[in-house]
Image (cartoon, helix red, strand yellow):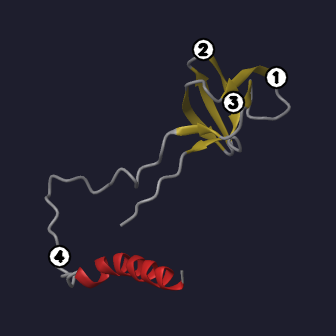
Amino acid sequence: MRSSRIALSAAVLGVLALPLVSATAATAAQASVPSTMSATRACDRPGPWVIGTQAVVIRSKASAKSTRLGILYRGHRFTVHKTSGNWHYITDTTTDVTGWVSGTYVYRDVRMCLD
């Protein structure tokens, strides 16, 4: 039993070490970027607007005490027109309600470049 564990461990370590042993040294050649290529990558641009909770109240003014006009649910599509402080003026394209929502619950999705 003990010899089979040792053999299995050796085989697993061999498989894991194979990419390290067979890897060649990386060369640091400077890649030239064509001038037609955009300087901004997709991961550098802000992501789409998302709702960070199940539902957000759409209000008539950028204040938590203002009149409620409707509710923006997570599955609804919406357009952000402008931002004032931590409030966004939106149009819920699913219900055609326009008003203000708190930026605490509606925000841009974060993207990350991994290079």
Q: Amino acid at mark 3?
A: Trp
Image location (x, y in percent) of residue 38: 24, 52
Mark with earlier residue (2, 4): 4
Mark with earlier residue (3, 1): 1
Q: Decide: marks 3, 2 in contact (CB < 8 A)? A: no
Mark 4 vs mark 1, foreground winner is 4
In which quadrant will I find the N terminus? bottom right
Which residue does the image show at 55% across and 32% down from the upper left? Answer: 80
Please give the label number shown on residue 100.
3
Taking the image as shown, residue 41 lies to the left or right of residue 65, namely left
Which residue does the image show at 62% across and 31% down from the upper left? Answer: 89
Q: Mark 2 Cα within 10 Å, few/some/many (few <14, many 20+)?
A: few
Q: Mark 1 Cα within 10 Å, few/some/many (few <14, many 20+)?
A: few
Mark with earlier residue (4, 1): 4
Mark 3 vs mark 2, foreground winner is 2
Please give the label number shown on residue 30.
4
| Residue pointed to by mark 2 | 96
Image location (x, y in percent) of residue 22: 23, 81
| Residue pointed to by mark 1 | 67
